[in-house]
Amino acid sequence: MTASTGGTAARRAAREAASAKSAKGKLASTPAAGSNRRRDLDPDALAALEEERDFLLRSLQDLEREHAAGDVDDSDYKELKDDYTARAAAAIRAIDDRTTAVKSLRPQRNWKRTALGLVLVGVLAVGAGWIVFRNAGTRAPGQGLTGDARQDSANLILQAQGLTGQAQASLQAGDSAKALKQFESAVQTYDKALEISPENVQAMTYRGWVLHTIALNSEASVAAELDQQARKYLDEAIATDPTFSDARVFRAILERNAGEFAAAKVDLDAIDMNAIPMYMISMVNGVKEDVAAGRRD
Amino acid sequence: MNLALGRAGVTLGLAAAILGAVTVGYGLIRHRPELVRLSRWYAGLVFLGGFIAAFAMERALITRDFTVKYVADNGSTKTPALYNFATLWGALEGSIILWALILGGYLVAVVLKFRKRLADPLVGWAVFTMLLVCIFFFWMLVGPANPFKSFSPPVGFDGPGPNPLLQNHPLMAFHPPMLYLGYVGFTVPFAFAIAALITGRVGEGWLLATRRWTLIAWGFLTVGIILGSWWSYEVLGWGGYWAWDPVENASFLPWLTGTAYLHSVLVQERRGMLRVWNISLLCATFALTILGTFITRSGVLESVHAFTTSGVGVALISFFALIVLSTVVLIGWRGDRLRSPGRIDSPLSREGAFLANNVLFAAFAFVILLGTLFPLIVEAINNDRVSVGVPYFNRMTMPIGLTLLFLMAIAPVLPWRKASGELLRHRLIWPAWIGVGSMIFAVVVGARGFAPVLAFGLGGFAAGSAGRQLVLATRRQGWRGLVGRANGGMIVHLGVVIIAVAFAASSSYVRQAEFTLTPGQSAQFAGHTLVYEGQNIKQESAKIVDQVLIRIDGTGPWAPSLNKFANGNQTIGTPSVRSTFTDDVALSVIDIKDGENGSVTIRVTVQPLIIWLWIGGAVMAFGTLLAVFPGRRRNPLDAVSAPVSVEPPKEPTGATA
């Protein structure tokens, strides 16, 4: 290995090639030979050779120019040109040798394997896309693009109310499939609120109300089941807080729609009209009129 | 004065970056090394420009100079000093100043480190690439993200101050700079990767030159992410630390690809393989830092259409596209040279394990990128506003995470090239027993559920494996057995195991409830007794703090609060957390009812092992520090441990030279 010290990269390469030739058959199988070979295949060494080649070719051009300008005499010109040419040739030979060696050692591209790999990546990408599609839900107002920080019950109820508003807008636009999805998201959001705050009458009440709204837009067989669940939540809300008027208003509407006018009247009479918001007053009055007239919605 | 100074700084930085890039580029193309060496002066001027801009903005913030629009929008006379200082990175324009300053710092550090090799084309092209990146960020400061716009404040004007959430915890002063040191730090290895592609020196030289830079950037990014989680836990009050929201994902994506690179680079160093992969990973890491900045800073989170109205969004996405395009073109150009002649001999080898690790990290990054971009794509296509929730991320990343833990246990004991079953049995027996013991212990103390118990077992297995390597290394080398890339890496692995176990426990066994209490009333939850003692109202310079005093198991009182900021209409909560080595009880105030017997509604979140997340993060940071520290030096010219197989193996003759 002493031959590899000093000189240009091309000369070193030439010396190494010569010493490798002389040791042919003797060193090839040793670890040192493998290490030499790896060094031969090093792209950095190849880049150094290319750099040297470019430098020498540039030097030859400079030499021609200086000779033409009369700055270099003929004998120096010849000596320098021979030297540059020999070194450039050595560099180019070394580059060719290395390029050939790299090509010969490079494993054949296995097209079948490549195609299989591409198909596999494609299948995985499509699979992941399908999974993300399945897991994507309607974004509630205030909700982020991804993830979900655990919300407190008040925020969850706000979120669910936003989803209910979106669902009603979808219904008005005639997109009942989208509306159903948004109503379901609202129900799930109320469930989350109830999970952390099981006695939250607002969540119970509005969960029941959303279920009844879905029932109104469903077939009779499904609607009965949904109304039964809605009633359960409204009953629970009133049992937890008998003064919470919203629950009584909604239960009265449900009862009116079911033709249970006497039960509806009891709930309507129990409502403190001073404690309900303005928009609800007209609603209650309307229901009262319907109940008095024995009229379903 | 501050406006003029700031504008001068930005102009100086931009001019120096442009002139530097032109000079260095010309010197490189025309083979004029004396011009390339001038880069040291240009680098200094770029840094000086960034420093002057940052200094001017800090001065404006501290002196409450409301003639600077950024200060008028984000400063306030009532903001406490620390948060006032941190307001520099509290909004978009200021954070770009910080980015430019750090970039200038890294540029100077590179030029100083490689001062004797500046004329080397590899270093020259790297500096040129960094100068191009500097041009982009200083141009942002002149154009779409100009922080030095003027404002005419009326008499008695006071700004609103930074977002209340950003002045609610001291971690805000440290988390963003750490994150930016990581983000921007990846510019250095990226620049060298581009330089390697341009010069054709795609061997191992550029890897060795940038090894430590990559580790440092990765270490900062790790610390930044951990501090971000901690801040989220201590400030946001939702009882968690990681919600897979887009901002978190944006910082996690480059971390994943960077981590994959730190492993796969070892295969290239040892075996000369995976060259295309490594360069691609590094360029992807840098590109993801820009994509992350686009996601968090362009307004795209509010509406996918919003970014087109902000120059910042268009600039960032264009820069991202330019990086991806130029990288793809350069890799295509050098494709032939990047193909390595070797191949992995056996999947049961160190390089086989690293390859598997890389596939998993790439899949991890893909899953998160897809989940993060999917709502944006859907909204852009059909205007539907969708959200990808936590279940997607948990379901998809859990199996990948568990497999990575398994690989973390196996890989360190695998030799290069191939391993025998007997060797594996010998090396893995103790770690495996530790893993089994961990599972049994977890079940005995009450852990239930397949995934978390498996995570505890694999965590024990991986910790045992890392511990074994460290014990062997310290036996051989004494204290030096703890330093260097391999040994420091094992300490990082221990930190990762601690975090993985804490993450599994805290996310699997979290319990949360809300209680409405009157003074003196108590509640029992998850084995803890909470007693509400009363309220305490404090007037601070920037806010009125309404504290709710609660004793937890007789300790405290702990004081979660609602803060009403003087200059804002927003009331935000500050949680209070009682941490122990076994669990955390986090309290946050949801509602304080005036005049109703002083009743309050609080949220209680009990999660086990939370504190170990921060301890694990500290261990990772310490391990990275030890990994950066030089270990036992190997002559860079020494042969690699495993020569490339060129011919069929024969009996060695013993003659080598």
Image (cartoon, coloured by chain):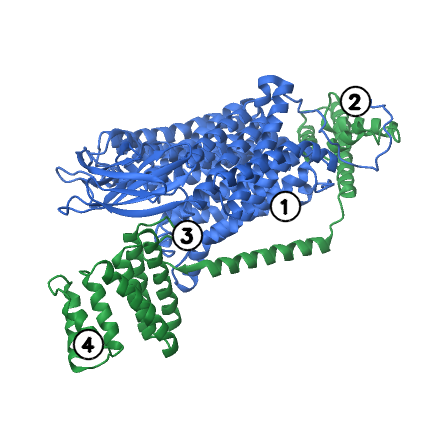
Task: Report in which chain the residue with disc 3 lies.
Answer: A
Q: Is residue B334 left or right of residue B386?
A: right
Q: Which chain is blue?
A: B
Could you tell me if residue B215 is visible in this image? yes
Q: Vertically, is B471 above or below B369?
A: above
Name the mark on residue A77: none
Query: Cα distance, mark 4 to mark 2?
Result: 107 Å
Q: Which residue is mark 2?
A: A1
Quarter of the figure that contains the C terminus of chain B:
top right
Q: Residues within 10 Å of mark 1 (few under 14, many from 20)?
A: some
Cβ atoms under marks 2 and 3 closer than 8 Å = no
* Residue located beneath label 4 in the image: A262
Q: Chain of mark 1?
A: B
Q: Is residue B292 left or right of residue B31?
A: left
Q: Report the amino acid beneath label 1.
A: Trp
Mark 1 vs mark 3: give the one in front. Answer: 3
Residue B289: % across, % down:
46, 42
The answer to whether dots 4 and 2 both sit on one chain is yes
Numbered circles on residues, count:
4
Q: Nearer the viewer, mark 4 or mark 1?
A: 4
Give the Cα separation between the discs numbered 1 and 2: 34 Å
Residue behind mark 3:
A146
What's the CA distance linking mark 4 and mark 1?
84 Å
- Image height check: is B223 above or below A188? above
Is B492 situated above or below B150? above
Q: Which residue is mark 1?
A: B333
- Quick one: label 4 or label 2, which is nearer the N terminus? 2
